Amino acid sequence: MPVKKKSQKEPDKDGVGLSSANLTEILETLSPIEKQVIPHLDLKEISQIVDKSGLDETTVLRALDFLSNKKIIDVKIEKDTFVELDFNGVNYKKNGLPERRLLDFLIENIRQFSLEDAKKQSKLTDNEFMISLGALKSKALIKLENGKISFSGNKEQATKKSMEEKFLEQLPMRLDVLNEEQKYSLDKLKARKGIILISESKQINFEITDIGKKVINNLGKIGSEMLEQLTPEILKKGSWKGKKFRKYDITTKGARIYSGRRQFYLDFVQDIREKLVSLGFQEMQGSLVVNEFWNFDALFQPQFHLAREWTDNYRVANKIKFDEIPKEFIERVKKVHEEKWKYSWSLDQAKNPILRPQGTVLSAQTIASKPFVPGKYFSIARVFRPDVVDATHLSEFNQLEGIIVGKDLNLRHLLGLLKTFAIEIANAEKLRFVPDYYPFTEPSVELDVYKDGRWLELGGAGIFRAEVVNPLMPEAEKENIKVIAWGIGLDRLAMLKYGIKDIRDIFSRKLDLLRDSKIKFDD
């Protein structure tokens, strides 16, 4: 009987479905680091391979990735997520949550205290005190009345540990073993700055495949004289003769190269700036520290307004010498406050220095500048407000503000401008206007945009009241000059653009987020 000849396509199998030609091809594509790692694959532990091979951990992991692509090993990555204490969490676990320290102080001293005294004596920061007030008020454990605070509740119940306190004592823990009470406590504490840290541990396991076993058994057959690259020196000496070059597998996924790039949020801000300039706007700029006159009084906010309380602004401890407020502005602003709000206006309070809590201060200063030229103006203003830092709130953020000053401007002009912004800046699918209230504009509207199946508030706008414009620009009334104004939360607009769920990620050091974010390249 004649012997059946093997077809050229039929592999010469040795129990693993790998032909000799294919095995040789795999062997000839192995890089030097793969060859150094392969003899130690039976050790299983990455740290042991590092010790035996003499390579660093990063190089070993890269070699394992290459070997996995060649199906020499089968890699499995097991991830565990842990709930741990962040820097504030370590402090609070040792010394107690801020609300516990405030509550203990009030229980020990059963009487009323001013808010300032209670904050000082309980040794809390402004932010911690604000959080404590909200937490204790929601549990009906304190009474707030006429700027005073006192304990109000059942002392026996109040001294029991809260779910959040118990949870802190149990950390660190694996995320997947939390019960419902612990998940509730986690959500509460995650919303507060620096208490909870979510971390991931990654365990890399691998097994040698059947192909890998054949490669290991035949590794010594390829020799060590394979050349990695062709250099001028090799060509000159002719040392390439009689030797083999290592083959390159063009189907193997190469290592990703991370080049330097612009930070995505800064790129976004610059893009907004360029769009506004292209629409004919001029940029307004000013100091981060301002006095109350320009920030509040010039904008017709009375000196007894809640927005001027210490809980809503950062006071500057040291006295700062500002440029003198022109006397005519002082007189006109004082007159309109006392006539309209019916109180005795104080110049001393108007001179108090604060960190800028709103970008509209730049609009007031621009309107009051001499000589003022009617036109279109905008600002990208860094502003500061005491707040509980969480996924949607920061105590330091950016506002996009603008004004258009001209004769006979009306609400229709304002709505048309907002429509342009919604399309040009927010890429809105649909938009709507909702009546709103702001102390320095009338009428006022809220701009909502429809994005990804839901309505989102983009910003607010309105026409500056005569009580704002006329004291700063006396000719406005005579010449029928109007000021239409708008403001947009720039950070939230960035969240909308980049699909970011946590506003803190805008200023994140997370390398994956920074590397994967899309930025606009100049033409």
Image (spheres, rainbow, N blue to C red):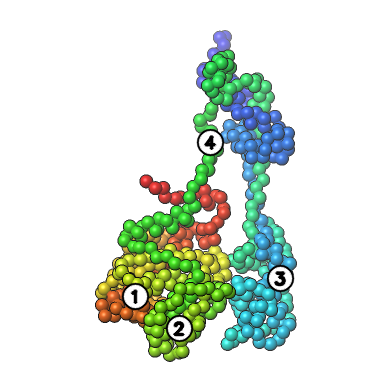
Q: Is residue 51 visible?
A: yes
Q: Which amino acid does label 1 sit on?
A: Ile
- Marks 3/2: CA distance? 39 Å
* Front residue (pair 33, 207): 33
Q: Which amino acid does label 2 sit on?
A: Pro
Q: What residue type is labelled 3?
A: Gly
- Tell me if mark 3 has few (under 14), some (14-19) or many (20+) residues whose alpha carbon lies within 10 angstroms of its own: some
Sequence order check, earlier mark of 4 and 2? 4
The mark closer to the camera, 1 or 3, is 1
Circle number at residue 253: 4
Sequence order check, earlier mark of 1 and 3? 3
Q: Mark 1 points at which residue?
A: 463
- Marks 1/3: CA distance? 49 Å
- Which residue is outermost to the top? 1
Sequence order check, earlier mark of 4 and 1? 4
- Tell me if mark 4 has few (under 14), some (14-19) or many (20+) residues whose alpha carbon lies within 10 angstroms of its own: few
Sequence order check, earlier mark of 2 and 1? 2
Task: Tell me the SS state at disc 2.
Answer: loop
Question: Mark 4 touching mark 2, by CB under 8 A?
Answer: no
- Quadrant, the N terminus: top right
- Marks 4/3: CA distance? 51 Å
Q: Residue 373 in the image: x percent, y percent?
A: 31, 69
Circle number at residue 302: 2
- Tell me if mark 2 has few (under 14), some (14-19) or many (20+) residues whose alpha carbon lies within 10 angstroms of its own: many
Q: Which residue is drawn at 49% across and 79% down?
A: 351
* Front residue (pair 98, 289): 289
Sequence order check, earlier mark of 3 and 2? 3
Q: Is residue 434 visible?
A: no
Q: Mark 3 points at which residue?
A: 96
In the rendered image, which quarter is residue 283 located in?
bottom left
* Front residue (pair 142, 373): 373
